């Protein structure tokens, strides 16, 4: 399958930050970039129109373009990880406004989930989050966009709680979240999206 | 001012190129003189790719760059607009350096993976045939970077942007001057006229920061300390364009500086430094938190608390610690560097090759120290006249200069 780690980045109108995020990755690291808005996210077009995908093409990333909006963040992230898993055994999930610092983190062979340190201007201290996954068929995001379940509905990990059925470890990975560098005009749309997010939970409860 | 939003687009595609020319633009008045000079410098425009990085939200600047770039016979043209309002020129040095770092990292993400590269700046006025000379110097071998030279616009001092760094202690930076030979090696240079390759440029670590040197100097000095060779060709003197005049190379004057400079070599770089020191507040145990979203048990999916319900802040913090709730207002009380329950750290078997985890890195302590120091001003001013930092107009008082800048160049 070639390289060991593939980065998976979900994007929508991220022309400002994506070059910085890509510029921090090793040249030879496979990257998948998945574009598209969400159904409840205010948008004119369901795909990026600011050149985000063109930036990813220029970098040499594997780009997934869409013509319809994604149902929600969970479906989009699952698609991104499924796609990334075709290029490497381990998937590193990054947002477009995040820069990988230092070396690509290593996930030991006997571990399923690797946690990395995140540095954000919102918080005075770095914090841990799961970002490295030895992705398997049937794994999917559900309920929240950092919560992963396996095909049987068993929790793999939440953003703060490691699922006991899988092996977790803290890696030396380091990510800087450049939230303050994002376009301010997107923040208003995102706040509106968050107020509507319970709709997705209802969907999962009904299914 | 009409504003432009972030976007990136190919204005012209033309196949394989022999050279990529990359230029950050921030000043509308610089566009025409820059292109006039560059196009006369010997750059093989017909076989070159042009990457224009407009680090601004000024639509007029974007239009000017677009029109002028397309007017040239470049084989291909790519236009990137950050859509970001420029920071105050000399306010908040940390914020400005972060922004400069962001621009450099952004350019790195837009360059081809390989090939010849010319990195220059919008206020660089190339001499006729200057690129041809510089390219010959680079092509002759013996260096990883070949640079022209340009006089800095630091207040009323005029050193060339070519440096010899004496480690000391104390560390001393000495501006080099032409005279010894046509081509010399330097420890650090600016990025205003650099001939290199895309691979070499990408190897530069723009996350290096020194609290007194300009970031270009910090970055290139870090490269030379790693063994890369930086040559300066004194025959390629680059004019430094200001809004109303050009500082010619023959304005160069000696300059050296001794200071307690520390190069902060961290993988994290300048953007780890917050503009304001944040203190973690203790949880208000009597406080009330209204849930903005349902509180859900990740393991079972059960809804523990509905949306829009008032709960104690203590409870909210506990829910956040267990991963059942996520809100920056609450997260600030749990993101304290602690390890979530249930996580273990694999034993480090090879200490020498394993990097330290983030919370143990001494660089954070260094950054905290630097953050509380007064950042040395990059524009040393020994006294009147105080020169406008955009157009160079002299004033008898600092106040007069500042008022002029605020009214004319805001």
Image (tube, grey):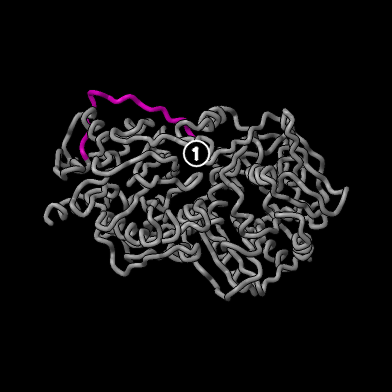
Q: Is residue B225 above or below residue B41?
A: above
- Report whether residue B383 is seen: no
Q: Is residue B252 above or below residue B198?
A: above
Q: Is residue B357 left or right of residue B377?
A: left
Q: Is residue B231 left or right of residue A43?
A: right
Magenta range:
B274-291
Dot 1 falls on a residue whose secondary structure is loop
Residue B375, image quadrant: top right
Q: How many marks?
A: 1
Tell me which residue sits at (84%, 48%) in the image.
B178
Tell me which residue sits at (43%, 30%) in the image.
B278
- Report whether residue B283 is seen: yes
Q: Residue furthest left?
A: A206
Residue B83 in percent (x, y) is at: 48, 56
Tell me which residue sits at (60%, 41%) in the image.
B90
Pointer 1 local density, CA inside 10 Å: few below 14, some 14–19, many at least 20: few
Of B154 and A89, nearer the camera is A89
Residue B357 in percent (x, y) is at: 45, 35
Tell me which residue sits at (66%, 70%) in the image.
B18
Q: Which residue is mark 1?
A: B354
Task: Name the chain under label 1.
Answer: B
Of B122 and B391, nearer the camera is B122
Q: Is residue B253 above or below residue B136?
A: above
Q: Is residue A175 left or right of residue B241?
A: left
Q: Does the magenta stretch mainly form a helix, a strand or a loop?
A: loop
Residue B284 within the magenta-colored segment of the rendering:
yes
């Amino acid at each position: 399958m070639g390289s060991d780690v593939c980065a998976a980045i979900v994007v929508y109108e991220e022309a400002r930050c994506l070059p910085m995020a890509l510029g921090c990755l090793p040249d030879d690291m496979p990257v998948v970039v998945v574009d598209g808005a969400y159904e409840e996210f205010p948008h004119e077009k369901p795909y990026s129109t600011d050149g985000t995908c063109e930036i990813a093409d220029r970098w040499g990333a594997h780009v997934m373009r869409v013509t319809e909006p994604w149902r929600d963040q969970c479906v989009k992230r699952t698609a991104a990880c499924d796609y990334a898993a075709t290029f490497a055994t381990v998937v590193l999930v990054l947002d477009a406004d995040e820069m990988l610092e230092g070396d690509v983190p290593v996930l030991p062979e006997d571990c399923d989930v690797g946690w990395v340190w995140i540095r954000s201007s919102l918080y005075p201290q770095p914090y841990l989050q799961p970002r490295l996954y030895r992705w398997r068929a049937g794994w999917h995001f559900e309920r929240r966009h950092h919560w992963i379940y396996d095909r049987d509905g068993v929790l793999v990990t939440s953003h703060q709680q490691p699922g006991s059925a899988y092996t977790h470890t803290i890696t030396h990975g380091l990510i800087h979240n450049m939230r303050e560098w994002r376009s301010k005009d997107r923040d208003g749309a995102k706040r509106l999206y968050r107020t509507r997010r319970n709709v997705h939970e209802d969907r999962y409860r009904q299914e | 001012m009409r504003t432009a939003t972030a976007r990136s687009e190919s204005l012209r595609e033309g196949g394989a190129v022999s050279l990529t020319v990359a230029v950050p633009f921030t000043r509308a008045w610089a566009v025409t003189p820059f292109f006039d000079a560059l196009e006369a410098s010997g750059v093989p425009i017909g076989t070159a790719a042009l990457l224009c990085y407009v680090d601004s939200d000024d639509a007029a600047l974007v239009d000017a760059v677009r029109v002028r770039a397309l007017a040239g016979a470049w084989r291909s043209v790519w236009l990137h607009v950050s859509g970001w309002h420029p920071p105050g020129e000399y306010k908040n040095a940390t914020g400005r350096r972060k922004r400069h770092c962001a621009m450099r990292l952004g350019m790195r993400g837009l360059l081809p993976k390989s090939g010849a590269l010319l990195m220059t700046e919008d206020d660089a006025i190339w001499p006729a045939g200057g690129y041809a000379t510089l390219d010959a110097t680079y092509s002759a071998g013996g260096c990883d970077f070949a640079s022209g030279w340009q006089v800095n616009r630091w207040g009323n001092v005029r050193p060339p942007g070519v440096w010899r760094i004496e480690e000391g202690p104390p560390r001393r930076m000495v501006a080099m001057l032409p005279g010894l030979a046509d081509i010399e090696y330097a420890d650090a240079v600016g990025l205003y006229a650099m001939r290199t390759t895309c691979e070499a440029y990408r190897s530069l670590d723009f996350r290096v920061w020194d609290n007194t040197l300009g970031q270009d100097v910090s970055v290139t000095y870090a490269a030379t300390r790693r063994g890369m060779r930086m040559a300066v060709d004194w025959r390629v003197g680059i004019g430094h364009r200001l809004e109303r005049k050009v500082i010619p190379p023959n304005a160069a004057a000696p300059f050296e500086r001794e200071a307690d400079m520390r190069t902060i070599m961290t993988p994290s770089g300048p953007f780890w430094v917050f503009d304001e020191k944040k203190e973690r507040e203790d949880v208000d145990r009597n406080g009330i938190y209204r849930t903005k979203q349902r509180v859900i048990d990740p393991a079972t999916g059960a809804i523990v608390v509905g949306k829009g319900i008032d709960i104690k802040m203590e409870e909210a913090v506990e829910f956040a610690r267990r991963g059942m709730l996520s809100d920056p207002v609450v997260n600030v009380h749990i993101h304290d560097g602690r390890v979530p329950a249930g996580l273990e750290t694999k034993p480090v078997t090879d200490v020498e090759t394993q990097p330290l985890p983030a919370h143990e890195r001494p660089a954070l302590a260094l950054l905290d120290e630097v953050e509380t120091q007064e950042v040395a001003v990059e524009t040393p001013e020994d006294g009147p006249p105080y020169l406008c930092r955009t157009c160079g107009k002299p004033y008898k008082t600092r106040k007069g200069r500042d008022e002029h800048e605020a009214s004319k160049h805001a």
